[in-house]
Image (spheres, helix red, strand yellow):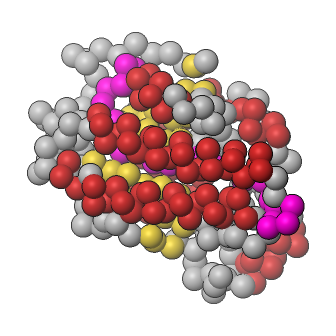
Amino acid sequence: MTINEQPSDPATAPARPVALITGVGRSIGIGAGIARQLAASGWDIAFTYWTPYDRRMEWGAEDGAAASIARELEEAGARTAAIEADLTGPDAPIRIFDEAEQRLGPVTALVLSHAESVDSGLLDTTVEAFDRHFAVNTRASWLLIREYGLRFRGQPGSKPGEPGASAGAGAGRIVALTSDHTVGNLPYGASKGALDRITLAAAHELAHLGVTANVVNPGPVDTGWMNDELRDAIAQGTPLGRLGTPQDTAHLVDFLCSPQGQWVNGQLLKSNGGAAS
């Protein structure tokens, strides 16, 4: 299922690079914040969402969120492609890239902000939950990165949106969001740890394409999952005295995707206000 269909005419489309962002299902989420920032910086945006996941969570699904987010991005000048995709399916990455390319053109930046996250520990995690976390957080991320690497056709030396650079040549970017949470959150933390290694491997294995790959740990960002007690405790334990926001993460991702961020590669960056683990 897709929404907000827009025909793409390469002859008349503006020279904007395309970013594919996963996990943009809620307007207050980190993925949506990143999408807004990149759109404002001159990117066209393809994004994925999966409403059944939000329905399973305490916060519930946000009706019409994908369409609303797409409208915001269009108001910022971006062409958009909203793609509903179940990342537990191993064929989902191919379909996502097919649709993003058909509607917007070649993907220059891949930002992985999707997640399966259901709290459980060593003793109460089920095999089903463990497998689902690794299918979404690890396997799907690997397959998305692999698909990106197979399709990217940039030439080292150009910048995003530069005339004659069909895929933002020399400006390929992969940014994955991670977490260091493990205690009481075993399948999420373990699957994110595996994602880190896959992304850092891409920094070396895709370097010949002119692609950089980095991991960002956004720290404690409340997107609707914290209660008041947890919010207060985290804010008090952070030197800056506040929680992170989606915008904090978005600014760092925006920099990494820019020409100015090209020397940052193969890094796990903490954007957490100095919060101690």
Q: Is residue 226 visible?
A: no
Q: Is residue 6 visible?
A: yes
Viewer-side residue, 213 vs 169: 213
The residue positioned 31% from the left and 59% from the top of the image is: 203
Viewer-side residue, 277 vs 78: 277
Which of the 4 image quadrants contains residue 259?
A: bottom left
Spot occupied by residue 246 in the image (x, y as percentages of width and height): 59, 57
Q: Is residue 152 left or right of residue 64?
A: left
Magenta stretch: give its range. Answer: 100-124
Q: Is residue 135 shown in magenta?
A: no
Q: Is residue 105 above or below residue 165?
A: above
Q: Quadrant of the N terminus?
A: top right
Residue situated furthest front in the rendering: 127
Q: Is residue 187 above or below residue 156?
A: below
Which of the 4 image quadrants contains residue 26?
A: top right
Q: Quadrant of the C terminus?
A: bottom right
The residue positioned 40% from the left and 13% from the top of the image is: 7
Spot occupied by residue 240 in the image (x, y as percentages of width and height): 62, 82
